[in-house]
Image: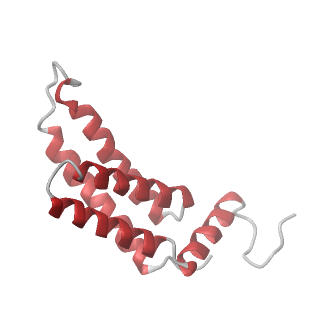
Amino acid sequence: MNKRPLTVTVIGWIFIVAGVIGFAYHFTELNPRRPFEDDAVWVLLVRLLAILGGLFLLRGRDWARWLSLIWMAYHVILSAFHSMFELIMHGLLLALIAYFLYRPRVSAYFRDAGVNSANPQRKDDTPAA
């Protein structure tokens, strides 16, 4: 299996840290008597998706690239209801994440990681049976 690209490691950890910090922050807003009031539960679920995406980026799962990209696109849409600065920043982050997660070398890493996780006994150079 080829080595994980540094950009995948950095982006994965950024998603994990952002998810954990956001989860901790928004957990304080949760009203235990009315958890669905103020959408606090939904916000916590979105934060858990960031953690999940980051963890599985580090494990080389291709679907985690899509989850992370969709998570960021969701934030771009949310930013449209806030300031122009937020919209621009989230849009730039989305573009950077897409660029770094879908470069040919990174795509090869995810492709190889998926093949090796589906068939752990198989070596990289051996043809599939």
* Snapshot quadrant of residue 100: bottom left
Q: Toward the viewer: 61 or 105?
A: 105
Asked whether 106 or 20 is in front, the reply is: 106
Give above or below for 78 relative to 42: below
- Depicted 52 relative to depicted 115: above or below: above
Q: Residue at x 41, y 57 (%)?
A: 68
Image quadrant where one finds the N terminus: bottom right
Q: Residue furthest right?
A: 129
- The answer to whether residue 38 is above or below residue 126 is above
Q: Which quadrant: the C terminus?
A: bottom right
Whole-percent x, y for residue 91 in the image: 30, 64
Q: Is residue 23 left or right of residue 3?
A: left
Judge left or right: residue 111 versus residue 15: right
Q: Is residue 36 left or right of residue 72?
A: left
| Residue 35, picture quadrant | top left
Residue 73 image offset from top left, x and y in percent: 37, 55
How far across and how far down the image is residue 95, in percent? 37, 70
Residue shown at 64% from the left, 71% from the top: 112
Please report the residue visible at 76 percent of the width from the left and 68 percent of the height from the top.
122
Q: Where, by quadrant of the figure, is residue 92 drawn?
A: bottom left
Identify the residue at horizontal 46%, vertical 63% (top origin): 57
